[in-house]
Amino acid sequence: MRSPILELQGITKAFGGVEALRGVDFALCAGEIHGLVGENGAGKSTLMKVIAGVHTEFSGRFLLDGHEAHFRSARDARAAGIAMVHQELSVVPDLSVAENVFLGQQPTNRFGLVQWRRMAREAGEQLKRLGIDVDPYSRLGDLPIGLQQLIEIARVLFSGARIVILDEPTSALSPPEVERLFATLRQLRDAGTGIVFISHFIEDILRVSDTVTVFRNGQKVAETAAAATTKGALIEAMIGRDGKALEHSYSDDLMLPPPNAGSVVLKVDQLTFARSLRAVSFEARAGEVLGIYGFMGCGQQELSRILFGKLKPDGGSLAVDGRRRTFGSTASARRAGIALVPESRRAMLFHQEPVYKNISISILERISSVLLKPARERAIAMRQVEQLQIRPPVVGLDLGMLSGGNQQKVALAKWLTYPPRLLVLCEPTRGMDVGAKNDVINIVRDLRAKGLAIIVLSTEPETVLSLADRIVVMKRGAVVREFANEAVSKDRLLEAA
Amino acid sequence: MASSETVPAGRKQGGLATFLRSQMRNIAPFLTLIFLSGFFAAASPSFATLDNLGNILTQVSVTGIIAVGLTFVILCAEIDLSIASIANVTGIAVAYFTMQESYVNIANFPMPGWVAVLLALVLCALLGVVNALGLTLIGIPSFIMTLAMMQIAAGISALLVRGQIAYKVPDVIATLGSGSIGGIPWIVIVAALMLLAGHLVLTYTRFGRYVYMVGGNREAAEYSGLNVNLILGSVMVIAAVCSGIGGMLGVAHFGSAQQNEFDSYLLDSIAAVVVGGTSLFGGRGGIGNTIVGLFVLGVLNNGLDHVNIDSFLKILIRGLILLAALVINVYAQRLRARTAE
Ligand SMILES: Nc1ncnc2c1ncn2[C@@H]1O[C@H](COP(=O)(O)OP(=O)(O)OP(=O)(O)O)[C@@H](O)[C@H]1O
Ligand SMILES: [Mg+2]
């Protein structure tokens, strides 16, 4: 084995007395893809931020090419050839695709002017390598979130860095996009780049990595060659107990239950929206989880926004409990008993506010008429934090200090104190570890038992299969297939989409 | 890259540093205030006197009243450039509806005092509603919308006074603007009460929480099912009404109502809010910050009169202080964002 280009020894990092990393050793070689797994809050992102110069205060030794290094900023790290795709999207929605690909390093001519045409051409070429065909001049914010993520990945992959860190890059990608990403990663590896790859999809980790490291509670608990381990073994190392129960593959047929007799809560009729939705009709019933599956860009995202009054449909109608509704705002949808958890955490959480304010914001009306009741808010938040096992269980902490997966739980917790009539969940388990995914599955089942109508929209077949009683498949803005009371499997879903 | 020692992950040190960093926007304006006060007290014996404190309070009162509403707007990450014009037109309107002396050459509509005040309040609220509708229904950025309103309000003022000056305002306004009780000017009391009310609303009410949340992350507020447009509209109306009140009392305070009387108050109010540390990006700050900002400006303006300084240089100095405050404001936002990463 070659000697490592990057070596960390005994890294300890604390946030105000809480140790997120405890004496972690980590090494990365050139020409290696290093997979990193661990539960939510295990410290994966924290370690990567240490490497990428985001966190600059920590103890332990940091060796780059065998020499001690100390970065004062992410800029230092970039100058030393380390680039990172963060778990949270950090693209600039108001800039063009090309500008985002070249963010911070736009090609200029000798007068210091940006070479627009060259930038657009090169951006287009790089994106093609990832299989993306998009106008480099289009505004990034107008693209679906999966594409935005790919563009951010492209920026980092093609920045010429020799150490590339990808923190959960695939959570918003469709299977073909993941394949192309992996092909590109292998090419870069063969060209000598050292790559760290974090994911909660253990199959992906096993498929693409050479080495796998497992984190638990801020410590490294295992490091093995990917070829020498199994999914079960990794899960066991992650959660510290037997992981068999959490290991599902969904490749076999799964029997959907017979249609349930609950009343129709939502009826969607001939909904159309720009070029994204074409005459979409379906129903959601009380006490039933309706899964809506489709590839990125199939119109799911627009559909969920219309249901919550964020977008106005061009045609068609919505009826809630038999009454026709047109929503002028998200507030009117909420009052009609509809709740939405969008796929992007950033879109629905307040990072600079404490956890309890994040949880109480949607239900303040029910808690207080004029004056706030902070004690009551905290108590309600605490109950949700305990129920969803959000870590750390401190409701006064700023939300931004929680790990990605725990933030996702807070997004869900917002709606659970006073359950709505219809709960719309977009990618509810994205970014969650196996244990937390299971928790979410249980919560959703609980809510279903309470008689809520639930719609789960996802681009991951596993998510839909693990939650839904009935599945609608969408393709290019139209409903193409419905699975009810019959056998279904991952392959059949992929085939239909 | 040279080698360097690693920093121990000390608990207290990390905690305190983080705390100080996150409080930067509150601490910096306060230190500025203490520094300026100390400086002027040392430079001039007439500065640090009770009398002069009274002067400063009176001098910042009108700005303070206007700044209450503006604080709401800036907390929502919007801006209102029409506040001074609305103050002006409301002050003129209240005089317009009051019987003037015969030598004042204005075709006005005398009304009973309370009707005049009511009409003036309705006028400024209406202008606020127009701002609100432009911002929310049509979607004009507040910067542009209120720039237009600045002209519109100035236009109405011009039509009402036609270049003349009115002097009389209803008795209650005259008292509140220029009277005093127990040696304390009423206008200072009104300003204090309005600042207090603003603070209570922002800190202890549901509406106040919504203002902070909308300013902190508008998209998230919308996805939480808040009626963002209603909240934005409300703050625009609040700003207009506060400006209107400031305008009426200001007219009484100055003893006359005329065109362009309030022009300097636009910058002063924005400066007070921003110098105090309320984030231009929304969601951070509050009335407490605005009060500190008011005092910084008040001490600065007043203190520069006490030391012998070229009055043209004063303008430059104020500009530099404002620039420094803006730098701190933007910098504090960045530190804060990094701490919460
Ligand atoms: N800026 C911060 N301030 C305070 N605590 C933090 C901060 N960032 C992370 N933490 C804490 O450090 C721990 C590790 O977080 P980290 O983000 O590294 O987890 P992770 O392994 O990436 O989890 P996930 O899979 O959910 O993304 C968590 O307990 C988290 O709450
Ligand atoms: Mg993470």
Image: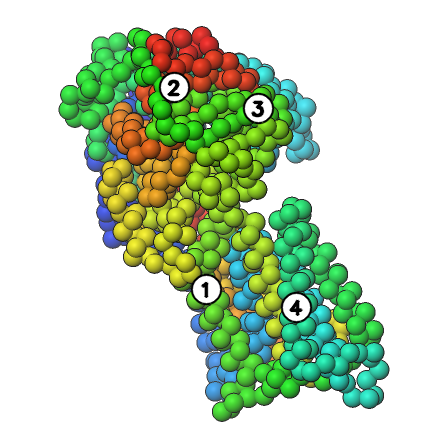
Ligand 1 near label 4 (Cβ, under 8 Å)? no
Residue at (72, 75) in percent of width and height: B92
Precedes in sequence: disc 4 or disc 1: 4
Q: Label 2: chain?
A: A
Q: Circle 4 sits in a helix, a strand or a loop, which is it?
A: helix
- Does residue A87 appear left or right of residue A479 in this picture? left
Q: Label 1: chain?
A: B
Ligand 1 near label 2 (Cβ, under 8 Å)? no
Which residue matches tag 4? B122
Residue at (81, 69) in percent of width and height: B159
Precedes in sequence: disc 3 or disc 2: 3
- Does residue B332 appear left or right of residue A203 in this picture? right
How far from the left and from the top, in percent, is residue B69? 56, 64
Q: Is residue B285 above or below residue A171?
A: below
Which residue matches tag 1? B201
Mark 3 vs mark 1, foreground winner is 3
**Disc number at residue A470?**
2
